[in-house]
């Protein structure tokens, strides 16, 4: 006896198709969300790594400001040294007008896509001190004297020179880059050798949306305050630097709405171009070793 074959009805087929499509749709959304979350975390991790790298390098460099081998304050015997950077857009010249200055900053407020800058200088007693920053190396010192470092077998390699390092942000055409630029002056004739010993700017990190510095200043009354460069009348009284770096994600369209940032409890700021990038503020207070 032959049994009757039973198939599925049209209604059953449609129900199964709807359930299958719902399952596929759910899995697709889960995959897209997972990819978006991974992309967001990857960008955040890259931003954090870059910011931490720069802040650590700044800390090592600023510990040398006003430095001497004995640990006492030691400054160059010149009063009006300038450190200008050619090119476009124009980066303001920073000048040391006081023989006792080892640190000097400048505001750049004409465009909020630009950032603050500062220059610090220190007395170089040992060539190994140049390795404290990616901005300087032994090649810089060799150029300062226009010859190879004498007696390379001498591990101490005692020298007598002034190193200046400038920190600033500039547009490289595709994004804003945090740069450092160094110069070495020899005590014999610093003014004539300064231009010839200025090194090429070294890019440190890119995707820097904003760069801001606040300076801790001691007053004659024994008090202190933190202010911008325009608030500092005597740079020999600066004892600390607050560094604020606003990083932007390398990828666009990471957020559904336009996001911004706030620096040191101030008003929320937003980028000039809305590309739905992720923004995050990184900050650190760095105390100067030879502060007043």
Image: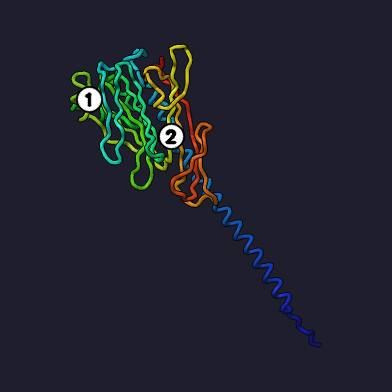
**How far apart in space, not on screen, are marks 1 and 2 (Cα)?**
29 Å
Q: Earlier in the sequence, mark 1 or mark 2?
A: 2
Q: Is residue 70 above or below residue 174?
A: above
Instruction: Depth check: give the residue in front, 281 or 22.
Output: 281
For mark 2, give the secondary structure.
Answer: helix
Residue pictured at 48% horizontal, 38% vertical: 48
Q: Quadrant of the C terminus?
A: top left
Q: Which mark is residue 149?
A: 1
Instruction: Depth check: give the residue in front, 271 or 194.
Output: 271
Circle 1: is it few (<14), some (14-19), or many (20+) Cα within 10 Å?
some
For mark 1, give the secondary structure.
Answer: loop
Q: Quadrant of the N terminus?
A: bottom right
Circle 2: is it few (<14), some (14-19), or many (20+) Cα within 10 Å?
few
Residue pictured at 46% horizontal, 44% vertical: 271
Residue 30: image location, x then y, percent:
61, 56
Looking at the rendered image, the disc whose residue lies closer to the viewer, 1 or 2, is 2
Residue 116: image location, x then y, percent:
39, 32
Q: Which mark is residue 53?
A: 2
- Give the left or right position of residue 200, taking residue 176 as reference: left
Residue at the bottom extreme, as displayed: 1
- Whether the residues at callouts 1 and 2 have beta carbons within 8 Å, the answer is no
Instruction: Depth check: give the residue in front, 52 or 276.
Output: 276
């Amino acid at each position: 006896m032959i049994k009757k074959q039973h198939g599925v009805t049209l209604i059953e087929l449609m129900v199964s198709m709807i359930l299958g499509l719902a399952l596929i749709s759910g899995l697709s959304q889960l995959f897209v969300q997972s990819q978006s979350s991974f992309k967001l975390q990857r960008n955040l991790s890259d931003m954090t790594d870059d910011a931490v790298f720069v802040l650590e390098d700044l800390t090592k460099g600023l510990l040398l400001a006003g430095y001497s081998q004995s640990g006492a304050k030691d400054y160059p015997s010149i009063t009006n040294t300038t450190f200008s950077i050619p090119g476009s857009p124009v980066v303001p010249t920073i000048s040391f007008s006081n023989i006792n200055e080892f640190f000097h900053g400048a505001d750049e407020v004409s465009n909020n896509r630009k950032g603050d800058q500062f220059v610090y200088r220190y007395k170089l007693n040992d060539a190994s001190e140049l390795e404290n920053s990616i901005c300087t190396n032994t090649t810089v010192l060799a150029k300062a004297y226009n010859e190879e470092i004498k007696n390379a077998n001498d591990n101490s390699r005692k020298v007598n020179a002034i190193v200046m390092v400038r920190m600033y942000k500039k547009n490289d055409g595709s994004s804003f880059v945090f740069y450092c630029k160094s110069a070495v002056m020899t005590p014999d004739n610093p003014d004539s050798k300064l231009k010839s010993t200025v090194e090429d700017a070294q890019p440190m990190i890119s995707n820097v949306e904003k760069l801001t510095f606040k300076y801790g200043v001691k007053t004659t009354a024994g008090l202190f305050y933190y202010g911008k460069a325009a608030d500092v009348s005597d740079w020999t009284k600066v004892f600390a630097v607050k560094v604020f770096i606003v990083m932007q994600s390398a990828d666009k369209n990471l957020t559904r709405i336009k996001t911004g940032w706030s620096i040191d409890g101030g008003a929320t700021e937003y980028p000039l171009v809305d590309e739905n990038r992720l923004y995050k503020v990184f900050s650190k207070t760095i105390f100067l070793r030879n502060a007043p």
